[in-house]
Image (cartoon, helix red, strand yellow):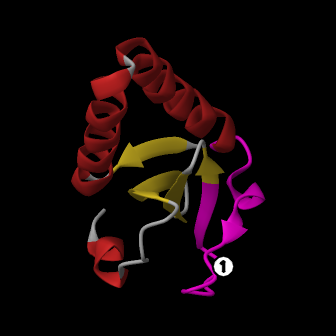
C-alpha cells in the first residue's frame, strides 16, 4: 500500500520536529525517522489503527506516536496521512479536508 502525506501533515511533522529540536536536536531526528518507519509498517496493515472517535468512519483512523496523533485515511491502494497533532491539542475537523 502506498503512503501519501498531505501538505498539512508534512507541515505538522516539521513543526513538531522544530519544537523537539529546540531542546534536543538528535531526538528530533530520531522522532521523525521513527514516525516515517512506523507509517511504513502501518501501510502493511492499515486497519490496525483505531477509528478516530470524533469521526467514527471506518476509513478514517489514527495511531499514537510518541505523544502525537497521526490521523490517516484508508483509500483503495493508499494510506493518506491527513494530519499529525499533539495529543493534547483539540481535534480540528478542518484538518481532514487535506489529501
Q: Which quadrant is the N terminus positioned in?
A: top right
The span shown in magenta is 43-63
| Residue 2 among those drawn in magenta | no
| Residue 26 point in image, percent of width and height | 42, 12
Residue at point 70%, 59% (across, down): 49
Residue 49 relative to residue 85: left or right: right
Residue 73 relative to residue 13: left or right: right
| Residue 53 point in image, percent of width and height | 63, 82
| Residue 47 among those drawn in magenta | yes
Residue at point 28%, 80% (across, down): 94
Residue at point 73%, 60% (across, down): 47
Foreground: 32 or 77?
Answer: 32
Residue positioned most to the front: 23
Pointer 1 residue: 58
Foreground: 92 or 23?
Answer: 23
Residue 95 relative to residue 72: left or right: left
| Residue 40 point in image, percent of width and height | 59, 33
Note whether 24 is above or below 82 in the view shown: above
How many numbered dots are placed on residues in this image? Answer: 1
Foreground: 17 or 88?
Answer: 88
Residue positioned most to the top: 26
Q: Label 1: state its secondary structure.
A: loop
Residue at point 58%, 27% (across, down): 37
Q: Quadrant of residue 99?
A: bottom left
| Residue 28 point in image, percent of width and height | 40, 24
Task: Answer few, some or many: residues within 10 Å of disc 1's Cα (few below 14, many 20 plus, some between 14 and 19).
Answer: few
Amino acid at each position: 500500500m502506498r503512503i501519501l502525506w498531505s501538505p498539512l501533515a508534512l507541515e505538522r511533522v516539521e513543526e513538531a520536529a522544530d519544537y523537539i529540536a529546540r531542546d534536543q536536536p538528535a531526538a528530533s531526528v530520531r522522532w521523525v525517522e521513527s514516525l516515517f518507519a512506523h507509517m511504513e509498517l502501518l501501510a502493511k496493515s492499515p486497519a490496525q489503527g483505531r477509528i478516530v472517535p470524533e469521526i467514527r468512519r471506518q476509513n478514517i483512523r489514527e495511531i499514537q506516536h510518541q505523544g502525537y496523533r497521526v490521523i490517516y485515511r484508508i483509500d483503495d491502494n493508499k494510506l493518506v496521512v491527513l494530519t499529525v497533532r499533539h495529543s493534547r491539542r483539540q481535534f480540528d475537523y478542518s484538518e481532514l479536508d487535506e489529501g
